[in-house]
Amino acid sequence: MINDIRLDGTASLQYQLYQQLAQRIVQQRYLPGSPLPSSRQLARDLGVSRNTVNAVYDQLKAEGFLQSQAGKGVFVHEDITTIVRPVVPGPERPIPTVNALPPLPVPPHNNLMMGEDTNLPFQPGLPDLDAFPIRSWNRILHHQESRWSLRGYDSIKGYQPLRRAIASYLRSSRGVHCTEHQVIITNGAQQALSLVADVFLQPEDRILCENPGYRGARHALGRFNNPLVPVPLKNRVLDIEALANLGPAKLLFCTPTHQYPMGGILNLSERMALVNWAQRNDCWIIEDDYDSEFHFFNKPFAAIQGMFDNAPVLYVGSFSKTLMPSLRVGYLVVPEQVVDAVLWAKQLSGGETPLLTQATIAEFIDSGQFTRHLRRMRQLYRDKWTLFQRRVTEDLDGLVRPVAESAGMHLVLEGKFDDRVLHQQLKTHGFGSTPLSAHYLREPGQTGLVMGFASASEKQMEGCVRALTHLLHDPGRSTPGLIPPDSR
Ligand SMILES: Cc1ncc(COP(=O)(O)O)c(C=O)c1O
């Protein structure tokens, strides 16, 4: 029975013997109830020690493959067919094919995050990674790494000192009304948005989204196929008056303090009108406050969440821009009644956010380094914003129009060109961007490029403007070229 076992030097003898016996039993080449040789006999036949065979037999017995009968020997377990399903050997074994799979979600065309060029200079959303205070960060990281209490599990809600630090920062810097109990740490703003979808949406609930707007939000909120309803912009901010004609909705996603990507800022009366509208229509506002730390000349407007009593607001923030995207840490501030539901959703979708990272951020904030870092970055991005705008205005005059509020980390260059092609072409020159038309829901809307200047050096700005000049002037049209007037 056992003369088909072959042992060689590819792995330990015990491992090979175990694998081969188990495989033959599963494939029913050794039938249920059939006897195996004694360990002494098998050891002799295979030229291995008896201890090796005994160890394998013991393991197979413990796993239910074999059973011993007192005084009779070792047998393949009688119940083996109910323990393992028979497997048809050989090529006839049915292999699940793609056709047998259920319809799979299809990632959107041109999904940047699945590509590899996510860290090119000018990639929107990317901070200046060279300016990150890596030495101070590493000192804190090493200190936290040695703490025993950070080696185990922690709460789904997030590390308490970090929630406390965020709540205090949001109260003082953004006017958010919250206690640490309302702050839930998430794996980036992206998870915060997905959790909102998990908790708030019923089938058929409609979601209003700024148009053009942030694609990450549309993907997260639309993942259960709820209808996404575009809300147009007016003067580069959400058109509040248009809401009256768009019908009921459960959620409204917006970036009131720096509209993404067009850069407008919702003023006080518009903020009031938005909250009034939401209260009257039982709609929750998702306030994505993704880069309000970087307003260059004025203090940014306080967050809507804290401006009005009982405003139905779910507040989303992230350390991707203030620190580094690779940390994958963001936060969601919700009313107390909703906290447990969000935590349950978070537990089901991956659980805690890495504790060591959270503790490092908490110490970075508590030590005052976060505030100093923000101050430095605000100055740095202001200089870059000024420089890039100047270069674009001087060198690309008549080809693109920079659209910029004095805030943030990106600039939109509007123009009449095929922005998807230009975006691809620019990538071959080593520069990131996103096509403005890709930020529109349904209709393509305006064309242009969203350029993240924060990650670009002065030299890269020069190189990028030179590349754009060349690409936009190219008479051969092998490159994107200008769209002939009236062709759009
Ligand atoms: C509008 C907007 N919100 C939020 C984020 C942050 O997302 P995350 O925290 O998932 O990196 C970004 C990043 O680019 C963004 O552009």
Image: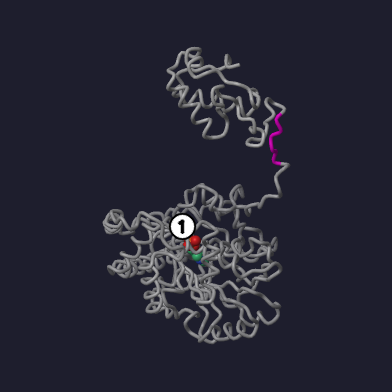
Q: Nearer the viewer, residue 118 or 176?
A: 176
Q: Quadrant of the N terminus?
A: top right
Q: Position of residue 317 (x, y in %)?
A: 46, 69
Is residue 398 shown to the viewer in this render? no
* Residue 415 against residue 281 in the figure, above or below: above
Q: Quadrant of the C terminus?
A: bottom right
Q: Position of residue 415 (x, y in %)?
A: 58, 63
Relative placement, left or right, of 243 versus 361 is right
Q: Nearer the viewer, residue 191 or 341?
A: 341
Is residue 173 shown to the viewer in this render? yes
- Marker count (numbered): 1
Residue named by callout 1: 122
Q: Position of residue 209 (x, y in %)?
A: 62, 70
The amino acid type found where label 1 is placed reads Phe
Relative placement, left or right, of 209 versus 157 is right
SS class of the residue under badge 1?
loop
Question: What residue is drawn where x is 28% and y is 54%?
Answer: 146
Q: Position of residue 27 (x, y in %)?
A: 64, 27
Picture quadrant where residue 420 is located? bottom right
Q: What's the image's color scheme?
A: one colour
Is the magenta region chiefly helix, strand or loop?
loop
Q: Nearer the viewer, residue 155 or 277?
A: 155
Cβ of mark 1 under 8 Å from ligand 1: the answer is no
* Residue 82 against residue 92 in the figure, above or below: below
**From which residue to which does the magenta span run?**
93-98
* The stretch drawn in magenta includes residue 205: no
Question: What residue is drawn where x is 56% and y is 29%?
Answer: 67
Q: Mark 1 packing: few (<14 Cα in 10 Å), some, or many (20+)?
A: many
